[in-house]
Amino acid sequence: MGSVLALSSGAANGTWPFSPDTPPCRWDTHPAHWDRPPHWERRDGRLPNPGSFHSLHRSCKDVFPQQMEGVKMTVNKTLSSFFKASHTFHLSAVSPSYYRFHTEHLQDDQYSKDKDAPALIGEMDSSGSLNAHSLIHLTERVRARAVFQSQQSQFVTWQFETEYRGRDFTAAVTMANPDVLRESVILVAHFLQSVSSGLVLGGELVYHRGRAEEGGILTLAGQYSRPNWVATLNAGKGGAHASYYHRANKQIQVGVEFEASTRTQETTASFGYRMELPEANMVFRGMVNSRCIIGGVLEKRLTPLPATLIMGAFVNHRGDKLQVGLGVNVG
């Protein structure tokens, strides 16, 4: 939930990383700096800005490991304080291998607090797919976002979003894949309101129109947070998504997720944890879910080299499948 593509994808995605379906596009999510509440919202005696609707479950999701399979190498290069580029090579026996070129024109977080600056992100892979992502601060409180996706010379997604952040609320409207000839469009409205210093309430309304069908889905959302934990719930006609994040100490974080979809009639419960070992420059993420899938990813910083070694494995005991991945990030 919280996605303009919610109508085409179920709420429960617990079959990953062994699902035959195409994984959700990462361009449907926001960069971390985009979701973070602005610095001018944090004032004594006033309710904080609740941030973006897309970031409600971010704390819990960051605990879980990301899917790994095959061999992957990423080379990052910072050309200036405003421009970065990266090259990614991925060899896989399950999915097609590819090369991806990624560029970013973005102000760093510390500088962007005092100056509104556009963010331009572009990406192209060896199959000819092109992704373009633009984020622009129109005013101190109004931001606009545009996403374009093409696969093999065919447009797949074109999405436009405008967000307004008040002192204690956030409102956003998104339009996706408008087509005048086919008379189709997807509209999404988000609203979040800080009720107290720890309680946030809001909702999402998704409306889609096409020649053959027309309808909408309403989802209500709530989040309660304390210094060491965050509990979030989304519930609506399409299903439910609940998460709980807890920071036990400086090294250990845990997260629990429950997802249910009325369309697929499936439910999934997942448990994940993240353990940091600063002395060893290591971070380990692990997970287990109700579908008998167990996985883990280990990240090791190879000091003094500017490189990170990533090793991961996921086992589906019910389907008797195994996926192993090895990666290196340079720069």
Image (cartoon, rainbow, N blue to C red):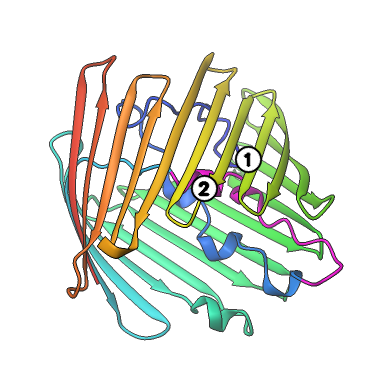
Q: Is residue 90 magenta?
A: no
Q: Looking at the rendering, which quadrant does residue 179 occupy?
A: top right
73 left or right of 218 in image: left
The residue located at (57%, 34%) in the rendering is 6
The residue located at (63%, 26%) in the rendering is 240
**Closer to us: 250 or 274:** 250
74 left or right of 177 in image: left
- Please name the residue that numbered disc 1 is placed on: 185
Q: Secondary structure at mark 2?
A: loop
- Please name the residue that numbered disc 2 is placed on: 248
177 left or right of 41 in image: left
Amino acid marked by disc 1: Val
From the viewer's perspective, is residue 252 above or below residue 218?
A: below
Say few, some or many: other residues with alpha carbon within 10 Å of mark 2 (under 14 / 14 to 19 / 20 or more): few
Q: Main secondary structure of the magenta part?
A: loop
Residues rendered magenta in the picture = 43-63
